[in-house]
Amino acid sequence: MTTMTKKKVEVYNHPREYTDKVNAQFAKPMVPTYELAHFHEGTLDYDFENFIETTDFESLPEEVYYDSSLKKYPHSDESIKKSLEIDLTIWKSDFSDYINDYMKNVRGFDTWGAQLNRYPKGSISQNHIDYHGNFRIRRGLYDDLQPPMMYEVIKRLWVPLQDRKHGHYFEVNGHMLDWKAGDVWYFRTQYPHTAAVLGDDPRYFLILTGAKQEDIDAAKAAL
């Protein structure tokens, strides 16, 4: 199968204080507290296996490819830069329609981001917490939603598209997860988490991020 060369056409510039904060955590790794920070919240009913087998992830429209903060900063692991990140709010497909309907009509988010990730063999996501920079910047919420309040407003869901395979690893605040395809996990992103693909098979998963307008408005009013 012939594939196209991917181009990353959308770049988001972060304020200097933000990039300094992100880089600092890679230079001095975050320490877990071992408090429970992840919760199983249901299951998505979709034929993920057929979706993965029939989709050429290398040849999607060039505008859907995306680079997260983990790829952009000097202290991030080089292996993570080989991963694919696909913006499902831009990609028009039956699958993205399904996920966006879930975020809007099932979860009730007024604004959201939906990202599909494919991590190849050998990829490592270093221990880190999330600051939701792209989510806040793209929606004009960077100044309105700051730590620690933003963690009460911005919700993050993690959804694996496969049953856990040998060598697939995801740890949240010191707790290792086990999973089945379609599991919906909510996790508190102010706690450190890390992941890796140590087996031969790539790992496919979703990162879903959303907020409700009433929560955004309450955070603004509290400033």
Image (cartoon, grey):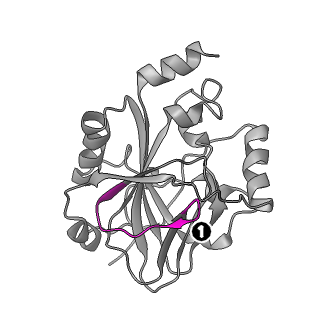
In this rendering, the answer to whether 42 lies above or below 215 is: below
Residue 153 placed where, x, y %?
50, 31
Asked if residue 88 lies left or right of residue 187, the reply is left
Task: Please indicate whether residue 134 sits to the left or right of residue 184 in the image.
Answer: right
Picture quadrant where residue 116 is located:
bottom left
Q: Which residue is mark 1?
A: 80
Residue 105 pos. (x, y %): 25, 34
Badge 1: how crowded within 10 Å, few (<14), some, or many (20+)?
some
Which residue appears farthest toward the top when viewing the image? 221
Task: Residue 145: give x, y in percent of width and height.
Answer: 60, 28
Q: Residue at (52%, 30%) from the top-left corner?
A: 139
Q: Main secondary structure of the magenta part?
A: loop
Position of 186 relative to 147 (above/below) = below
Q: Quadrant of the N terminus?
A: bottom left
Is 68 placed above or below 5 here? above
Range of residues picked out in magenta:
172-184
Q: Secondary structure at mark 1?
A: helix
Q: Is 34 within the magenta?
A: no
Q: Quadrant of residue 158?
A: bottom left
> Does residue 58 appear in this view?
no
Q: In the displayed structure, does residue 44 sit left or right of residue 72?
A: left
Query: Measuring 58% from the left and 59% from the top, which residue is drawn there?
Result: 173
**Amino acid under label 1?**
Ile
- Residue 132 sits in quarter: top right
Measured from the top left, where is residue 85 in percent x and y? 48, 59
In the displayed orientation, state which residue is furthest to the bottom.
Answer: 200
Q: Nearer the viewer, residue 55 or 71?
A: 71
